[in-house]
């Protein structure tokens, strides 16, 4: 079996990791990668679930103005609204308009 450049790169990376951190740290690194993968898959699943849900009807919508700042930002980001540099009132208006169009 002839090794292509890709396999050599993987072998080289593994050797560099062994050299830099030593074999005793490899399980910790692998565990960290596993946890990161698990969190990514969980977030992907939640995003897919959110996309499949219907928007609540106006009678079912909560009063957006009663949300805390953290929840307001979370709702805005869930709806795909950028929050950076916007006031609370601007976010509320954008959320209301986004919910009204759905």
Image (cartoon, rainbow, N blue to C red):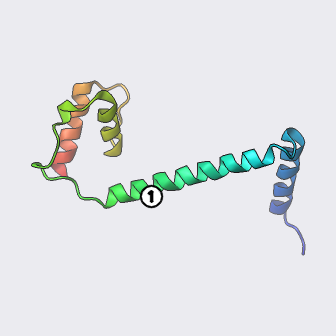
Give residue 58's position: percent from left, percent from top.
Answer: 11, 48
10 Å crowding of disc 1: few (<14), some (14-19), many (20+): few
Front position in the image: 70 or 102:
70
- In the image, taking residue 29 as reference, residue 24 lies left or right, namely right
Front position in the image: 32 or 16:
32
Residue drawn at point x = 30 percent, y = 28 percent? 69
Eyeballing the image, is 84 above or below 53? Answer: above
- In the image, taking residue 36 as reference, residue 28 lies left or right, namely right
Q: In which quarter of the image is the N terminus?
A: bottom right
SS at circle 1: helix
Eyeballing the image, is 101 above or below 63? Answer: below
Count of number-bearing discs? 1
Give residue 89's position: percent from left, percent from top.
Answer: 21, 26
Residue drawn at point x = 67 percent, y = 46 percent? 32
Front position in the image: 99 or 36:
36
Give residue 13's position: percent from left, percent from top.
Answer: 83, 50
Q: Quadrant of residue 48?
A: bottom left
What residue did someone put label 1 on?
A: 45
Residue drawn at point x = 17 percent, y = 50 percent? 101
Give residue 95's position: percent from left, percent from top.
Answer: 23, 39
Residue drawn at point x = 47 percent, y = 55 percent? 44
Residue projecting furthest to the left = 59
Eyeballing the image, is 91 above or below 13? Answer: above
């Amino acid at each position: 079996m002839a090794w292509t450049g890709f396999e050599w790169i993987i072998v080289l990376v593994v050797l560099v990791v062994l050299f830099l951190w030593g074999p005793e740290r490899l399980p910790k690194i692998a565990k960290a990668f596993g946890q990161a993968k698990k969190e990514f898959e969980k977030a992907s699943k939640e995003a897919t679930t959110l996309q499949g849900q219907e928007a609540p009807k106006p009678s079912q919508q909560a009063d957006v103005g009663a949300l805390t700042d953290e929840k307001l930002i979370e709702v805005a980001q869930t709806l795909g609204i950028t929050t950076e540099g916007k006031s609370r009132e601007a976010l509320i208006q954008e959320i209301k308009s986004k919910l009204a169009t759905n």
